[in-house]
Image (cartoon, grey):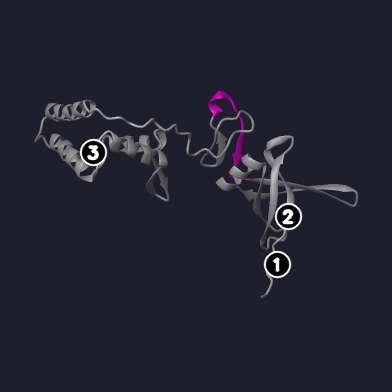
Amino acid sequence: MEIGTVATRTGLITKCVKTYKYLDIKQGKYYCTEKGEAFIGYLHQLNIDLFTERNIEFNMMIKSVELGRETMQHSIEKTADEIRSIIAQDVTVSSAQKFTDSNSLGKCPFCGSDVLDGTKNFYCSAYKSGCKFVIFKNTYCHFSFVKDGKEIKYSKPMSLTKANCKALLGSGSTTVSIEEKNGKGKYKIGVTFKSDNMHDFVGIERIREKKKVDG
């Protein structure tokens, strides 16, 4: 079974993923989203048959047109008849569910719009309207402490996941792993936004590992 034709396949899949969000891609595989499942539910309520057998039938018709075994006009008329029969039904469909962007990680602290997952950052969906809020996935955590009366500042690289982003947007802090100063091993630390710059982060508390107690 094929999806559309060679000329239309890429566009159909791209729209299902990016525009309509009926599908999601994870590790090179396509998965049906909650929105996609709901859409399928509405098709069932309308008695629209898009099961495998029906898809094969439509694909065979498209292939017949491509090979010249059937005219395009005839296939259009068959499709039109199918649509007319669907419209003629007396079917009650339950009220459509309102979908928020399933990819939203939380609300932007600047403007209240959804924050989305980008390739290298988490960004505000209202960026086209001028919102500048962004969290880079590979960034730095800044530290400062006083030693011998002098303030010492330094930074350590850290990586932020979607879970970290959700926590930051929800509670204002999250826990990350940072490499030890000597480069041997990592430790966990709580981080939060800098008070004067929400594009930067500061370490707030080292998370002590719980010691295992022998039974």
The reply to whether residue 108 is visible in this rendering is yes
Picture quarter containing residue 49?
Answer: top left
Q: Earlier in the sequence, mark 1 or mark 2?
A: 2
Is 151 left, or right, of 181 in this rendering? right
What residue is rendered at 67% in x and 41% in y?
172
Identify which amino acid the numbered label 2 is placed on.
Arg
Is 16 left, or right, of 189 in this rendering? left
Picture quarter containing residue 192?
Answer: top right
The reply to whether residue 161 is visible in this rendering is no
Mark 1: give few (<14), some (14-19) or many (20+) Cα within 10 Å: few
Mark 2: give few (<14), some (14-19) or many (20+) Cα within 10 Å: some
Counting from the top left corner in percent of width and height, residue 78 is at: 14, 30
Which residue sits furthest top?
Answer: 129
Front tag of 2 and 3: 3
- Judging by the rendered image, the residue that carries numbered circle 1 is 211
Q: Earlier in the sequence, mark 1 or mark 3?
A: 3
On screen, residue 178 above or below 31: below
Counting from the top left corner in percent of width and height, residue 156 is at: 69, 50
On screen, residue 51 above or below 180: above
Q: Which residues are magenta?
A: 126-138
Label 1 – label 3 distance at C-alpha:
59 Å
- Judging by the rendered image, the residue that carries numbered circle 2 is 206
What residue is rendered at 51% in x and 41% in y?
119
Is 166 covered by the magenta stretch?
no
Is 165 left, or right, of 155 in this rendering? left
Is 136 covered by the magenta stretch?
yes
Identify which amino acid the numbered label 3 is placed on.
Asp
- Judging by the rendered image, the residue that carries numbered circle 3 is 49
What residue is rendered at 38% in x and 46% in y?
31
**Residue closer to the observer: 139 or 124:** 124
